[in-house]
Image: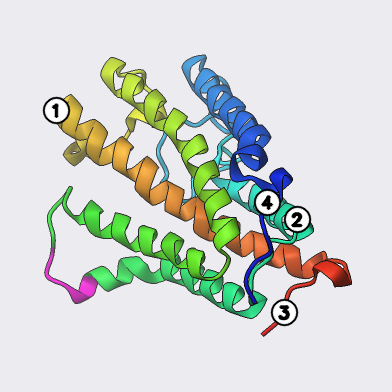
Amino acid sequence: MPEPAKSAGAHPMRLVLIPAVITLAVTLLRLIGELQGWSPRWFSTQTGGMIPSGVSWIVGITWLAIPFGAYFALQLVHAGQGPQSIGKALLLAAAAILFLLVYRYILYLFPPVGFPRVLIFIWLCWAIAGGLQYFGWPSLFKVLLCYGFAARIPVAIVMFFAMLGNWGTHYDYVGMPQQFSMDPVPRFLWLAFFPQLVAWVSFTIAVGTFAGILAALIVRPKPERSFPIR
């Protein structure tokens, strides 16, 4: 059956406002901590990929997709905008998480692609993982898409100025290989703009959807707002 009519209280922009402000505050806190040389355990300037070392990931925004994904999902279910099939949504979300874990091994099936062009393949993989979620829970996908852009556009802006001024933070890739040395414009596009607004937004959608579906299953809705499990 189709999703019920949208509730004003579940409008994507309304739902993401406070989470976006919290995420921006965390981004600025991380930036200030790195610039001021606060404890590297919490404010590491080293870029560690998807899983930073130590506990520096706590003062970061990547993991926020989990609690906010759960929050968005519960709000949508409460507003009568749950998925048509929670089983299908869970399957697509689980497939996306699995794909994000193994996609790098697919690289070995193709001829070697030089850097930075290999990044296009990585972005595409992450975009597929995120895009699949539209077919499982369209309403949650739209909310997480809005949140993803609200979270990552400020990061891209910070990275632009960090790279321009060589601030010595993880936002300008301190400690990364020599191949990351490029002219300012291509460096920003390859290492900040597209990764943040394509890859990391897609990652946020995939992880947020998985967390949201689990939350919806754990916190079962009232009978009049229940969703079919098939």
Estimate the spatial distance between the alpha carbons at disc 3 and disc 4, rounded to whole Å. Answer: 19 Å
Q: Quadrant of the C terminus?
A: bottom right
What is the CA distance from the residue labelled 1 to the residue labelled 4? Answer: 40 Å
- The reply to whether the C-beta atoms of the residues labelled 1 and 3 are less than 8 Å apart is no
**Dominant secondary structure of the residues highlighted in magenta in the image:** loop
Residue found 45% across the figure and 60% down from its top: 130
The answer to whether residue 110 is above or below residue 183 is below
Residue under pointer 3 = 228
Q: What residue is shown at x 42% (from left), y 62% (from top)?
A: 131
| Amino acid type at image mark 1 | Asp
Q: Are marks 2 and 4 in contact (CB under 8 Å)?
A: no
Q: Secondary structure at mark 2?
A: loop
Q: Is residue 192 left or right of residue 211?
A: left
Asked whether the beta carbons under mark 1 and mark 4 sit within 8 Å of each other, the answer is no
- 219 to the left or right of 144: right
Viewer-proximal residue among 8 and 48: 8
* Residues marked 3 and 4 touching at CB (< 8 Å): no
Which residue is at 59% across, 72% downward? 89
- Which labelled disc corresponds to residue 183? 1
In which quadrant will I find the N terminus? bottom right
Callout 3 amino acid: Pro
